[in-house]
Image (cartoon, rainbow, N blue to C red):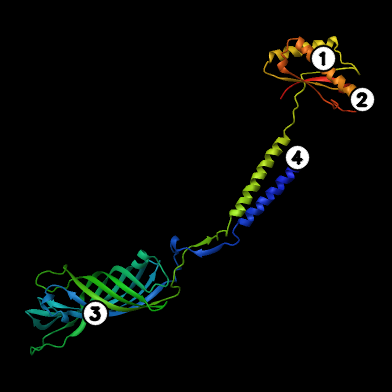
Amino acid sequence: MKKSTLLALAFVLAGGATALAQDAAPQEVTYVEDPSQGYLFNRFKDNWFITAEGGANIYFSHGDKERSTWDRFGPAAGVYVGKWFSPIIGLRAGVNFMVTKGLSDIRTVDTRPAMINGKYNQKFNEVGPVFDVLLNLTNWWCGYHPGRKYNCVFYAGGGGYWTYARRYEQDAAGNWNNGKWQRNDDRILTFRAGVINSYNINEKVQLALDIRYSGLDNHVDEAGNAWNRTSHDLAAFLGVTYLFNKREWNAPVVPVCPPAENCDALRARLEAAEGRIADLEDQLKNAQKPVVKKAPLATIYYPINIFKLTKKDVLILNACAEVMKDNPDNHYVITGWADNYTGNDQINTRLRHNRVNGVKKQLLKDGVPESQLTATINDGNLVDLGEKYVALDRAVTIEQAQ
């Protein structure tokens, strides 16, 4: 096959293979959010909230167990502003108020004159700023889902309280006044932790049950220095939260490529085309290699109608015989030729046989084994360059067999 034809076929097949590959490619790529990649932080103005809560607390300090449990409950409330920085982490800050009730061994400005089991009634109003770090356990452990109704949030934080108490004083007649609320001279610190059980009413409003523990600096309520002793408080609140601006979270967007419906047929066609391309490439490489035809060992030329060898021809055949005997594994083909421009088929056939037999006889005489020789004739012209060059067609060729 000609080189240009091979190139054309290879081009056509390569174009077909490319078309098959394009047909097999997905036609459309979609982009979706992938929660497995995590969630992105929103803008600073997003995911803010405000919370208002109210409830009750019970105070635990020195000697409080001697006061009726129900008498130790007091009201509590709070207002907060906060922001979620991710579906898991948030912060809030606000103002908290609570009433603490207990007993004291000593009478101070904040105690009533009435006594219980030898101890003074004690009541404080505590109000002050607080802040908390929020951790959404549900989103952390179960993954974020926009439509989830319930969330469990753990928080921990701290703050400080100003203390207000009634000042009970005795007049000159020995009577106790009703006592006026005034700020005490002490400020106490608090650390706290709790769990918020939040339920989403809709995308904007949440109801929550907040269970909280607080540790507080103790007021002086017993003989001796008891200021550094920590007292405790347990509280429960019902709260309402309103969510501002963007309330949900976005995951990173990733491309999704739809799978091909069925690639088996296309794959088989593509493999067949690639095989044919490889075969044509091999043929093209072989076509580009130069064809080297091994020259005859010798060619003996004859005049018209002559088949006898000259002395010069015999010398040439002597040299050929030496080569053949030095290479006993090689086999040689002796071919008799005559031109087809002169004489007739009968004469030319006889000339071909006589010429090839004469050469074979001389080689055998020079000692070449007959097993190395094959004598044959060819009815065509040796060079076939036309009648002007018929002398080149009257010959015997000696070639090494392939």
Disc nearest the viewer among 4 and 2 = 2
- The answer to whether one can see residue 300 in this image is no
Q: Amino acid at mark 2?
A: Asn
Instruction: Establish if 59 lies above or below 143.
Output: below
Q: Residues within 10 Å of mark 4 (few under 14, many from 20)?
A: few
Q: Residue at x 69, y 13 (%)?
A: 326
> Is residue 370 left or right of 358 when viewed as pictured?
left
Q: Amino acid at mark 1?
A: Gly
Q: Are marks 2 and 3 in contact (CB under 8 Å)?
A: no
Q: Residue at x 70, y 37 (%)?
A: 285
Q: Return the residue at label 2.
A: 344
Q: Earlier in the sequence, mark 4 or mark 3?
A: 4
Could you say whether the residue bearing mark 1 is in a helix, strand or loop?
helix
Q: Return the residue at label 1.
A: 358
Residue 172 position in % (x across, y down): 9, 88
Question: Marks 1 and 2, Cα distance to the nearest angstrom?
Answer: 21 Å
Question: Marks 4 and 3, Cα distance to the nearest angstrom?
Answer: 98 Å
Residue 61 position in % (x across, y down): 15, 73
The foreground one among 187 and 44 is 44
Numbered circle sitting on residue 56 = 3
Q: Which quarter shows the C terminus? A: top right
Q: Amino acid at mark 4?
A: Lys
In the picture as drawn, the residue positioned furthest to the front comes out as 346
> Is residue 348 left or right of 215 when viewed as pictured?
right
